[in-house]
Image (tube, rainbow, N blue to C red):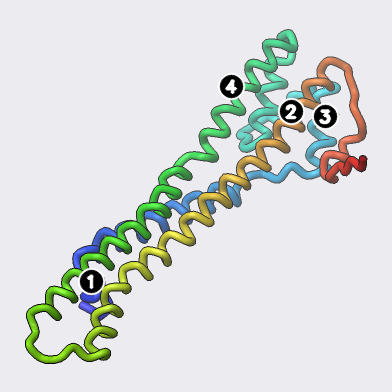
Amino acid sequence: MQPWWHAMGPLAWPLALCSLLALALILQRFWLFIGLQPVSQAAMRAAVSACRTCAREHCQGRVQGWRRGLALLLKHSALPAAQREEVLGCWLLEERQRLNSQLRLLQLIGVLAPMLGLLGTVLGMLQMFAGIAGQNSPVTPALLADGLWQALYTTVWGLLIAIPALAAGQGFALWAERYLQQVQALLNRCQLALDGLELEPVDSLARPQWVWS
């Protein structure tokens, strides 16, 4: 074993497990999010146009992301508007759960890892002071520094695990929320297009609307 592994003491294995689990979750979530189909202006115009004409061939074959919601809307285009909204609401809820899955576990690791590191530091300091108390020779600053260095090692590793885990968890949550807002806005427009209603041009969806008082 490496010296740094011995310096972490009994908390080495729990911290290693947290780091591996956090890395696996971050990679899995990142692979899912980069596979999301962007809601571009061209895609929005094509989707609204397909809803105006009920062109179901626009979503034939295997569709993913927001195109699944559009295909579901076109499939139930003959239903009343209230029932279509319920169908889309159920699909959006399932999509939200799919995107936010495992994020709470990732955030839990981000909270648990520094606590484990702090526990390792406390145990290391207890061991250090117990060793100092059993010595008859004078206590030198070098001896204290060496003991504190080893005691603080687990806290450093706990923070190194926690910071990326918390940042990734919050970042993925914001990513999912922004994506779902765009999908919901698109499906709302498609819903209106099925009923023969129109709003402002679709291009305005991609630009932020500023209101000055």
Q: Residues within 10 Å of mark 4 (few under 14, many from 20)?
A: few
- Which SS class for mark 2? helix
Cα–Cα span, label 4 and label 2: 13 Å
For the point 53% across and 53% down, which residue is it?
30
Question: Along the horizontal axis of the image, is 164 left or right of 157?
Answer: right
Q: Residue 83 at x, y = what percent?
A: 67, 11
Cα–Cα span, label 1 and label 3: 65 Å
Residue 90 - label: 4
Nearest to N terminus: mark 4 or mark 2: 4
Q: Residue 91 at x, y = what percent?
A: 59, 25
Q: Closer to the camera, 180 or 5? A: 5
Residue 62 - label: none
Amino acid type at mark 2: Leu
For the point 73% across and 38% down, which residue is it?
182
| Residue indicated by mark 3 | 48
Picture quadrant of residue 192: top right
- Which SS class for mark 4? helix
Nearest to N terminus: mark 4 or mark 1: 4
Q: What number of labels is visible?
A: 4
Q: Closer to the camera, 159 or 50? A: 159
For the point 64% across and 31% down, which residue is it?
68
Image vertical order of residue 105 relative to residue 126, above or below: above
Q: Given contact means CB atoms under 8 Å apart, are the residues at marks 2 and 3 in contact?
A: no
Question: Along the horizontal axis of the image, is 33 left or right of 112?
Answer: right
| Residue indicated by mark 1 | 125
Picture quadrant of residue 133: bottom left
Q: Closer to the camera, 64 or 185? A: 185
For the point 60% across and 51% down, which residue is it?
34
Q: Closer to the camera, 111 or 59? A: 111
